[in-house]
Image (cartoon, helix red, strand yellow):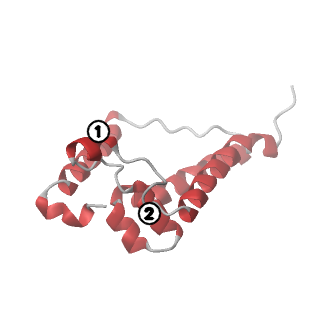
Amino acid sequence: MRPASVLGRLAVPAGVLAAVAGAFAYVGTVDPNRPGHYPVCPLLHFTGLYCPGCGGLRSAHAFVHGDLLAALHDNALATVGYPLFALVWALWALAAVRGRPLRFVPSSAQLWCVGVVAAVFTVVRNLPFGGWFHP
């Protein structure tokens, strides 16, 4: 068996990057602030409560246009997630170039921390004093 080429090892990370870039390009072009282009969040529609993802499309649109303050306002959790995704993708691509799999097995404590942050973000954005976090 011959070892896979660098381009072959980068195929999947490159495909993921192309999909994410395409999604960001679409959201950057088709403004989610204008009604009729995207579906309404079912949780918000039926309960009036903001889920952790509410405002994510508006956040991505603002992020693409370089308006970081608006992106943070629309969905702070997603806005923090964009550079984290970029970092993880870069580590994944570097590992692929080196011919090694990216090994990240989060501990229970790390998973709990992510869950707690998402839960606290969701609760705070639905309380009266969390109005800045409303999309």
The quadrant holding residue 46 is top left
User: Who is closer to the viewer here, 11 or 47?
Assistant: 47
Residue shown at 35% from the left, 59% from the top: 75
Q: Percent from the top left, x then y, of residue 132?
A: 23, 67
Q: Percent from the top left, x then y, of residue 61?
A: 48, 64
Is 100 situated above or below 93? above
Does dot 2 land on a helix, a strand or a loop?
A: loop
Q: How many marks?
A: 2
Q: Which amino acid type is shown beneath numbered disc 1?
A: Trp
**Quadrant position of the C terminus in the picture:** bottom left
Gap in angstroms between the C-alphas marked 1 and 2: 36 Å
Would residue 107 appear left or right of 50 to someone viewing this image?
right
User: Who is closer to the viewer here, 100 or 62?
Assistant: 62
Would residue 81 appear left or right of 91 to someone viewing this image?
left
Residue shown at 28% from the left, 45% from the top: 45
Q: Label 1: few (<14), some or many (≥20) within 10 Å? A: few
Q: Which amino acid type is shown beneath numbered disc 2?
A: Arg
In terms of sequence position, does the residue under pointer 1 or pointer 2 come before the other? 2
Q: Label 2: few (<14), some or many (≥20) within 10 Å? A: few
Does dot 1 land on a helix, a strand or a loop?
A: helix
User: Who is closer to the viewer here, 49 or 71?
Assistant: 49
Would residue 116 appear left or right of 60 to someone viewing this image?
left
Residue shown at 13% from the left, 63% from the top: 129
Q: Which residue is mark 1?
A: 112
Residue shown at 80% from the left, 46% from the top: 7
Q: Nearer the viewer, mark 1 or mark 2?
A: 2
Q: Which mark is residue 34?
A: 2
Q: Which mark is residue 91?
A: none
Q: Percent from the top left, x then y, of residue 64?
A: 53, 67
